[in-house]
């Protein structure tokens, strides 16, 4: 039995090594890209912190007053999202990329697109601060299942994209998501300025949820159109990977919208 277990373990280890050695060699030495385990570990730590450790630590403490920090953070994220949107457009979607089929260019000449994809991946860790701020302010009701799933899944999902396909068709996801985040973080930044802004923002919260749902429809359609384009030289696995995420998040956001606004 022990010999059989070692045999299976050896095969799994070899499969793991072969799979991740087949990634894009250009990104192999970039931070967090050698293996998915650090990213998975950070995401698990995030979930533990915001769902258990953080609320326990804050239970007998007063909420922190971090309004200035939140305003600075949110408008910094606006600038980062704008930068990502423009760069993804310049290197791809504003010009040379084909919206119907865009294979990945693995040449050294396309390293700029790969580096922007890595920066988009890294920005998903910065977004953990959204939840940390909720916990620090004891806004535990804001740490919803939707919120935590969304923030914990995205770094893992984008890691695989950067590792194997840092460019091409699936970067449409990052392109449109960066645009939506410009709007989202402007809303968060203005909201963080204080309750005097509530009157200006009350109607926009609902619209922002709708915008987020529309983005997932656009990503779903863009991804699964490859089902009807058999000649496109783009990995089919990533078509399903991105399309599945779009469907998952659409239903999660729809459930939130229904519960929050149906009345």
Image (cartoon, helix red, strand yellow):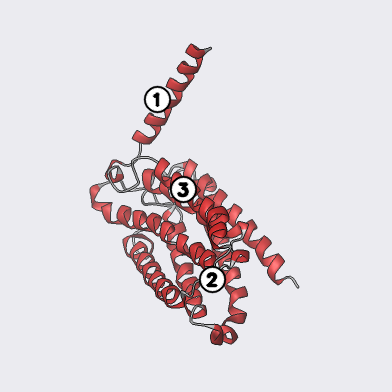
Q: Nearer the viewer, residue 7 or 240?
A: 7
Residue 129 x, y percent position in the rendering: 45, 63
Q: Which residue is mark 1?
A: 14
Residue 63 is marked as 2
Q: Nearer the viewer, residue 186 or 197?
A: 197
Q: Are marks 3 and 2 in contact (CB under 8 Å)?
A: no
Eyeballing the image, is 219 above or below 8?
A: below
Q: Earlier in the sequence, mark 2 or mark 1?
A: 1
Classify 10 Å Cα crowding around label 3: few (below 14), some (14-19), many (20 and above): many
Q: Which residue is mark 3?
A: 156
- State how far apart marks 2 and 1 are (Cα): 49 Å
Instruction: Look at 37% across and 68% down and name the residue there.
Output: 80
Q: Secondary structure at mark 1?
A: helix
Eyeballing the image, is 68 above or below 211?
A: below
Residue 179 is marked as none
- State how far apart marks 3 and 1 are (Cα): 22 Å
Q: State which quadrant residue 150 falls in.
A: bottom right
Q: Secondary structure at mark 3?
A: helix
Report if residue 149 is visible in the image: no
Classify 10 Å Cα crowding around label 2: few (below 14), some (14-19), many (20 and above): some
- State how far apart marks 3 and 2 are (Cα): 31 Å
In this image, 133 relative to 111: left or right? right
In this image, 4 relative to 202: left or right? left
Q: Are marks 3 and 1 in contact (CB under 8 Å)?
A: no
Eyeballing the image, is 127 above or below 182?
A: above
Q: Secondary structure at mark 2?
A: loop
The C terminus sits in image quarter: bottom right
Q: Nearer the viewer, residue 248 or 233?
A: 248
Residue 245 x, y percent position in the rendering: 55, 51
Instruction: Look at 59% across and 56% down and name the residue there.
Output: 249
Residue 162 x, y percent position in the rendering: 38, 48
Residue 159 x, y percent position in the rendering: 41, 48
């Amino acid at each position: 039995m022990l010999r059989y277990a070692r045999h299976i373990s050896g095969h799994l280890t070899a499969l793991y090594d072969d799979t991740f050695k087949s990634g894009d060699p250009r990104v192999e030495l970039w931070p967090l890209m050698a293996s998915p385990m650090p990213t998975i570990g950070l995401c698990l730590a995030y979930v533990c912190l915001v769902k258990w450790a953080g609320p326990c630590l804050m239970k007998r403490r007063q909420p922190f007053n971090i309004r200035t920090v939140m305003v600075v953070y949110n408008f910094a994220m606006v600038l980062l999202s704008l930068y990502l949107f423009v760069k993804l457009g310049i290197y791809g979607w504003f010009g040379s990329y084909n919206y119907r089929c865009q294979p990945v260019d693995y040449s050294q000449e396309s390293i700029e697109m790969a580096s922007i994809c890595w920066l988009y991946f890294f920005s998903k860790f910065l977004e953990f601060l959204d939840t940390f701020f909720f916990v620090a302010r004891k806004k535990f009701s804001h740490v919803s299942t939707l919120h935590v799933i969304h923030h914990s899944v995205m770094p893992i999902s984008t890691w695989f994209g950067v590792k194997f396909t840092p460019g091409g068709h699936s970067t449409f996801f990052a392109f449109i998501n960066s645009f939506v985040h410009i709007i989202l973080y402007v809303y968060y930044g203005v909201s963080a300025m204080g309750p005097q802004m509530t009157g200006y923002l009350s109607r926009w919260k609902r619209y922002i949820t709708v915008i987020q749902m529309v983005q997932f429809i656009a990503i779903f359609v863009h991804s699964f159109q490859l089902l009807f384009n058999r000649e496109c030289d783009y990995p089919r696995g990533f078509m399903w990977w991105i399309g599945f995420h779009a469907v998952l998040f659409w239903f999660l956001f729809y459930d939130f919208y229904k519960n929050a606004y149906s009345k």
